[in-house]
Each structure stands twice: as C-alpha cells, then as structure tokens.
Amino acid sequence: MKTVQLESFKPGQLWLDDRGEHISAHGGGILQYKETYYWYGEDNSSGYLNNVGVSCYSSSDLYNWKYEGVALKQEDMPEELQGKNNGRVERPKVIFNSKTKKFVMWMHAERSGYAFSSAGVAISDNPTGPFEFLFYDRPVLFEQEEGFDEHTNEKELGNSFRDMHIFVDDVDSNGDGVNDAYVFYSSEGNWTMYIVRLNAEYTWIDLPETDKRVRPQCTKEDLGKVWSRQFIRKMREAPTPFKYKDKYYVITSACTGWKPNQAEYAVADTPLGDYIVLGDPCVGDVDKTTFQSQSTFVLPINEESGKFIYIGDRWTPDELGKSPYVWLPLEIDENGNIEIKWQDEWKLEDLKV
Ligand code: DGJ
C-alpha cells in the first residue's frame, strides 16, 4: 500500500505508519542510532492485556515511520508477564551500550492489579530486535518512614517499580569506559520517585555482584551514592528526564490513572538530584492537563540552543491502541525556563530558528 509522505507533526491526531496503521508505541522512547531514529513503545494494538510486546518503528525524518515489527515479543517473556496471564509491559525504553555494543531495554513489567510492579530487562544485538528477556526484579530495598507498601509486597520483594525512564548522561564519572546511565521510576506505591545509577553493562544497578546477592538491591547504605529518593510523598509519575547545559531536568505528571493532569518540571545539578520543582512547563494550557497528554520522552533536536521535542501520550483507555500522541516543540531559555506551547500543526524548521 502506498502511503502519503508526511511533512509535519499534527499533535493529537491519528498517526499512520508505512502500512497505513496508527502507530502503536505508547509510553515510548526514541533511540537515535547512527542516522536512524528508532521509536519503541507499548504495542497496545490488541488491547490492554493482550499486548503483543514492545513495538519498534524506524525513521530518518521523525515524520514518517516504518514498522519494524515487535522488538520484544510477549511469547519471549516469562509466562507470568504474558497478556494471556494478565501480564503487561509499560513504558519500555531502549539505550545503546557503547562498550558491550548491546541494545538494552528496560520496562515496567506489570500484571493487572498493579501489584507486580517490577523492572524488566532485555538485550539485543540489533536495534530492531529480537530482544532476549533477561529477568525481572526490583532495584531497591528500603524501609521508608511510613513503612513498606503492602499492595506490592515491598517488604519481601523490594520497593515497587512502576512508571519509568532511562537517562544516559554524556559523562563517564567513574571511568568504567561507558557513559553513566540512570533509571528513574515511581516507587513506594507511587508515593516517591527513585533514581538509580546503572552498571557498566546497563543491565542492572551499579553495585558489585556478590555470591549472596547475584542481583543486588540498593539499601539505605547506598542512598545518596548510587540512588536517591526524589519528590518524596508527592505522587509523581511519567518521569521524563533530559539534560541541558550541565543541568538535569525531569518532567513528571501527577498520578490520575489514564486521565491527563498538570505536568511539573524540576531541575538539579546532578542526575541523582536533589531536584527543585520550577512549575508547569506548558504555556497557554487552559485546562491544565499538559495539553491533554502525559509525558513519556523529550527528544533533543538542537541541545546547544535549547530546542527539544516534548513527547506525550493522550490515553484513550477504551481503545488504548488508538491513543494519539502529542509531540510539541519544547524550548529552554537562557535562564533554564521551559516552554511547551500548543501547535495544531508544526515542522522541525519551526524549532531550529
Ligand atoms: C498512568 C501511567 O503513567 C501509565 O503508564 C499507566 O500505568 C496508567 N497510569 C494506568 O492507569
């Protein structure tokens, strides 16, 4: 089928791939590898539970996307995470490890009821997959003042792992030959956000493996060194970190299920924080719903001059696979203030000026 070549972004509208089907890559992220952009996300095309896995699309211009298939197939995941057994993958992100040359995928591995709440990790030699699922686990075991979250059995399994994002820095602070990477996620039953530094392979957290703890969890002794608690008891979701001029930014949403709410952005001097909340990044957003979307990624277009693309999902839970995307220009001024403004239609040239 011959599809129309797209030449602009139309936020909130259906977005057709090269097959003429609405792109299903929700809660997604973009990886730029060589000259190509890869968009990974939840394949919700067959519904909430029967999701087929993590989809992958490729593009050279960000408007026209070729369907590359299912990068991580549900059938290659553990039984308990398969759609037929109430399993589901949310907010997958893929990064490239320059040392191992592997593509590494992290995801929020879940089951209906949101008690499973674990990190899933998969790797591949190719950007389009197939990804091999390695394991699921929880990165931190920490008893907070209010005690452990019972719904997710934190006491036994570690602190819950839900909405997530992986951020790769442009520095190698410990000289292990690979740039530092961090996982951001909602924890403590969504009450508090955690940030944890990853190991040199990006396949787990940055703690030495021991015979006793093959996949160690961070504890309170590691707090402030390889992990931190941010937005404590503030119930923030949808972490979307990025960097601009040596400052670390993160956009988050409030916690209202599939309903959109007002975003906030925060800034810090180091990836682990502490983050200071600066306010709502949206300008002219009359109903204060992040232009009816929830953040999932910020894509740098021209980092030097503060030009980025804000990427969010406009969830339609009755037909999750048809949820539109909201891609909007995101600009940062010299003082570090972020502005996201609504556009019915726009082009990359609008950002570059
Ligand atoms: C909001 C989260 O950001 C989404 O990823 C999803 O988990 C929904 N909640 C489920 O209600």
Image: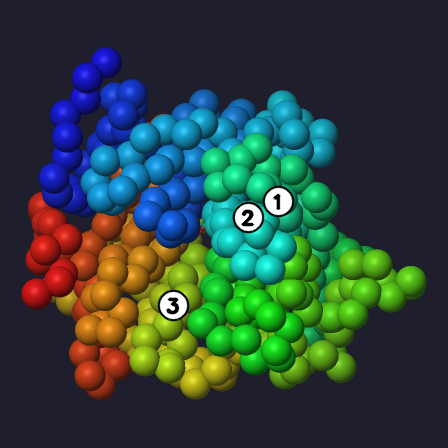
Q: Earlier in the sequence, mark 3 or mark 1?
A: 1
Amino acid type at circle 2 is Phe
| Mark 3, other Cα within 10 Å: few <14 / some 14–19 / many ≥20 | many
Describe the element under mark 1 as helix, strand or loop. strand
322 vs 293: above or below:
above
Residue 62 in the image, given as x and y percentages of width and height: 25, 44
Residue 183 in the image, given as x and y percentages of width and height: 55, 63
In which quadrant of the rendered image does the C terminus lie?
A: bottom left
Can residue 162 be seen by looking at this rendering? no
The residue shown at (29%, 34%) is 65
Per the model, the C-alpha gap separating discs 1 and 2 is: 6 Å
Judged left or right of residue 250, residue 290 is: left
Q: In terms of depth relative to the viewer, which is nearer, 112 or 52?
A: 52
Q: Closer to the observer: label 2 or label 3?
A: 2
Q: Which residue is mark 1?
A: 123
Per the model, the C-alpha gap separating discs 2 and 3 is: 19 Å
The residue shown at (76%, 82%) is 221
Residue 15 found in image quarter? top left
Q: Which residue is mark 3?
A: 242
Residue 123 found in image quarter? top right
Q: Which residue is mark 2?
A: 103
The residue shown at (36%, 28%) is 67
Describe the element under mark 2 as helix, strand or loop. strand
Amino acid type at circle 3 is Phe
Amino acid type at circle 1 is Ile
Tag 1–tag 2 contact (CB < 8 Å)? yes
329 vs 259: above or below:
below
Q: Closer to the observer: label 3 or label 1?
A: 1
Q: Earlier in the sequence, mark 2 or mark 3?
A: 2
Give the number of callouts. 3
* Disc 3 residue: CB within 8 Å of ligand 1: no
| Mark 2, other Cα within 10 Å: few <14 / some 14–19 / many ≥20 | many
